[in-house]
Image (cartoon, rainbow, N blue to C red):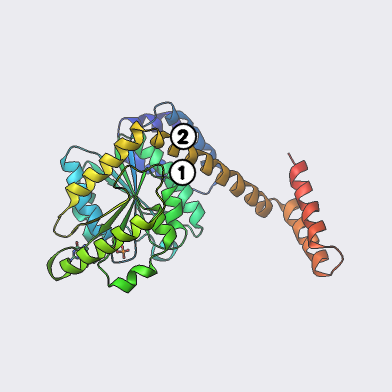
């Protein structure tokens, strides 16, 4: 593959080049990884300047509907919008983001939008790492807003929060006691809570739910990266395209405040450090699993531990010493 040419195609905003490049970074092949690294190096010379927004919510809350409405509002304002997904279930479903294509049909056809489903990989960490690199590629291709969708399951929110500037949580109208079920950790991650489906019969429930979340947010410890009034809970209707402009105004206001107060760049710097650590840990684990000598040693030490010939502590120290001594 001609990497400089691919990089040039991306810089020129060619969608086919972008799609090919994302496929390249998603590949597990060793030679592909080397090419992906060369490509990312090349593109690092001309960094993008996108706002990265994480969007999470449980299945059925309206993420796809929201992205369709919100994305089209943004492209209508002249933005270029990329949509990526970190989906821990994609190994099963083959990527849910396009599973319901009909809900994002118009955005998918929009020349100023680019939608990419989650790569099918079993390990969430692997998916997230590739998505992070895909963000860089989308930015280099001139997209100025990158939305990263994730289903509200387990660790995926943390991963998405670690690669975005803003984290938006989509919630459904609920009864008061359901609020208690929302994990505190997720609430603490949110910059903006959007109570969706605030339309028709559901509107009063949505408004009550919004007030409940607003109350819960006030109880959380004030974070240094937040101006007065954030994190915030507001009502939207993705279906009726209601409240979307206000939600966007909130996101922009928050991003601007963080830029002006040094939190924006500081967060990105911390994220770079986080992913570096993740990659090193992942690389070490991969070596343990892939290097036949390492595996043989693990097996041998494991057998001795099982037979009671050597303590776990001693066997671990042996193994780590080998890792340290290896080139
Ligand atoms: N009344 C109402 N219904 C909505 C709204 N947004 C989404 N829905 C409906 O909720 C259902 C689920 O919407 P989706 O957009 O597919 O939800 P999702 O979060 O993408 O779901 P998964 O992809 O399964 O995680 C659909 O029937 C939508 O029409 C809204 O603002 N109001
Ligand atoms: Mg969906």
Q: In the displayed structure, would residue 145 be above or below residue 47?
A: below
The percent position of residue 5, horizontal first and vertical second, equals 40, 29
Count all numbered tags in the image, as a single digit: 2
The percent position of residue 189, horizontal first and vertical second, equals 40, 53
Query: Of residues 114 and 204, which is closer to you in this image?
Result: 204
What residue sits 78% from the left and 47% below the top? 322
Whether residue 197 sits left or right of residue 55 in the image: it is left
The percent position of residue 255, horizontal first and vertical second, equals 31, 39
Q: Can residue 36 be seen here?
A: no
What residue sits 39% from the left and 45% below the top? 164
Labelled disc at residue 39: none
Furthest-right residue in view?
A: 309
Furthest-top residue in view?
A: 45
What residue sits 18% from the left and 37% below the top? 78
Which image quarter holds the C terminus?
A: top right
Circle 1 — which element?
helix
Q: Which residue is mark 1?
A: 25
Whether residue 317 sits left or right of residue 289 in the image: it is right
Q: Are marks 1 and 2 in contact (CB under 8 Å)?
A: yes
Decide if ligand 2 comes within 8 Å of the CB at mark 1. no
Q: In the displayed structure, would residue 195 be above or below residue 76?
A: below
Query: Of residues 228 and 98, which is closer to you in this image?
Result: 228
Which quarter of the figure has residue 173? Answer: bottom left
Q: Which residue is mark 2?
A: 40
* Lower sequence index among marks 1 and 2: 1
């Amino acid at each position: 593959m001609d990497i400089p040419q691919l990089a040039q195609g991306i810089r020129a905003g060619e969608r086919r080049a972008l799609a090919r490049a994302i496929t390249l970074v998603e590949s597990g092949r060793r030679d592909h990884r080397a090419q992906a690294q060369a490509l990312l190096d090349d593109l690092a010379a001309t960094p993008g300047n996108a706002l990265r927004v994480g969007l999470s919510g449980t299945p059925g809350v309206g993420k796809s509907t929201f992205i369709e409405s919100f994305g089209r509002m943004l492209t209508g304002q002249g933005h270029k919008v990329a949509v990526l997904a970190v989906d821990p279930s994609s190994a099963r479903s083959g990527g849910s983001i396009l599973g319901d294509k009909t809900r994002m049909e118009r955005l998918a056809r929009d020349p100023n939008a680019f939608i990419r489903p989650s790569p099918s990989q079993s390990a969430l960490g692997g998916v997230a790492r590739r998505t992070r690199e895909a963000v860089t590629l989308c930015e280099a291709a001139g997209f100025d807003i990158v939305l990263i969708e994730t289903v509200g399951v387990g660790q995926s929110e943390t991963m998405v929060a670690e690669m975005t500037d803003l984290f938006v949580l989509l919630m459904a109208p609920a009864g008061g006691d359901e609020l208690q079920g929302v994990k505190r950790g997720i609430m603490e991650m949110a910059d903006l809570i959007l109570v969706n489906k605030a339309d028709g019969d559901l509107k009063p429930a949505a408004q009550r739910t919004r007030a409940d979340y607003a109350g819960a947010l006030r109880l959380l410890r004030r974070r240094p990266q937040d101006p007065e009034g954030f994190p915030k809970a507001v009502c939207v209707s993705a279906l009726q395209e209601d409240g979307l402009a206000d939600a966007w105004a909130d996101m922009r206001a928050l991003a601007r405040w963080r830029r002006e107060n040094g939190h924006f760049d500081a967060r990105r710097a911390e994220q770079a450090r986080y992913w570096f650590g993740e990659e090193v840990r992942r690389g070490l684990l991969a070596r343990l699993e892939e290097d036949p000598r390492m595996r043989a040693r693990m097996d041998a030490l494991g057998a001795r531990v099982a037979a009671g010939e050597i303590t776990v502590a001693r066997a671990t120290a042996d193994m780590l010493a080998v890792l340290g001594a290896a080139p």
